[in-house]
Amino acid sequence: MWLDDSVKKDLLNIEPAHVTSYIEHLTEKKLSNATMQRHLSALNQFLAFYEIDVEYPTEPAETYQVTTLRSNDFISEQEMHRLLESMERPIDSAARDFLIDRNLAIVHLIRYKGLRPKEIASINMGMINLAQSTMEFNQTLYKLSGKPIEHIRAYLQTIEPLKQPRLHSQDPLFVSYNNRSQDYQYDYDREEPKRLSTRSIQEMIKDEVKLAGLRKLSAKHLRNSCILDHVRSGQDEKEVLHYFHLTHPYSLHRYKYYKDNLQDEK
């Protein structure tokens, strides 16, 4: 209701600034600490359930605490190897097996480039340079040499020419697939391929994790591991914040604390 009255923003598309403003709104109402905690707990659980990757603000400090990261908040190298190995293996499912390269490209972009599912769904062909194996997204240049670009190229070849995303255009890189018709979907009103949704990406990861026989893992675990890799590498904090499109310097605190104090936990 606050979003409807204040910023006219859909609940599934909130940004860090909206969370901060909402907390300020609650503070102005002079709620008790217990009531404030209930509001923030509900918001926290909502964001986690829908895997909305919004960095939590640290103010007001007396009513909001950032959750400490643990080893189970990341995907281990062994788990990642097992996931990729499973994803590469056909399972005699016409639809799933046809999408192996598309799905592998997506998982690589999350784990090794740190992109959110929402960001991956918004990638357009104009952002990709297949010749130079690069992608420019949100003022960040990503090098896609190796597996990511190999899977992207192989995936694009699976789309029939008339429905294939056009180079240097606003067409989506990742296209929705209809399991019943076993064909990529095309939006004839917009005269472009139909964009793969964020939710479809999340469901694909869930399905592949289950097929691999792993514990419950999501895109958040993959992205967390990518952020931790950058923190461990000793990169400049401002560069890491910019690379992962994080809005608050405190966003990296949990990762640095884990690296310094908890990374050897069992």
Image (cartoon, rainbow, N blue to C red):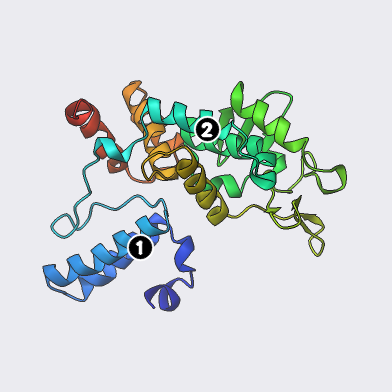
- Residue that badge 2 annotates: 86
Q: Residue at x 42, y 53 (%)?
A: 51
* Front label number (2 vs 1): 2
Three-letter code for the amino acid on which mark 2 is drawn = Ser
Q: Nearer the viewer, residue 122 or 240?
A: 122
Image height of 202 relative to 252, above or below:
below
Q: Quadrant of residue 189?
A: bottom right
The percent position of residue 120, horizontal first and vertical second, equals 57, 44
Looking at the rendered image, the quarter that the C terminus falls into is top left
Quarter location, residue 98? top right
Q: Is 15 displayed left or right of 248 in the figure? A: right
Residue visible at 24% across and 28% down in the picture: 259
**Image position, residue 161 (x, y; %):** 86, 42
Disc 1 target residue: 46
The answer to whether 232 appears left or right of 151 in the picture is left
User: What is the residue that sits farthest to the front in this orientation?
Assistant: 92
- Label 2 environment density (alpha carbons within 10 Å; few <14, some 14–19, many ≥20): some
Say what amino acid the circle numbered 1 marks.
Phe
Determine the secondary structure under disc 1: helix
| Nearest the eye: 175 or 212 | 212
Percent from the top left, x then y, of residue 7?
45, 71
Q: Residue furthest right?
A: 162
Distance between mark 2 and mark 1 Cα atoms: 30 Å
Disc 2 secondary structure class: helix
Name the N-terminal-most of marks 2 and 1: 1
Looking at the rendered image, the quarter that the N terminus falls into is bottom left
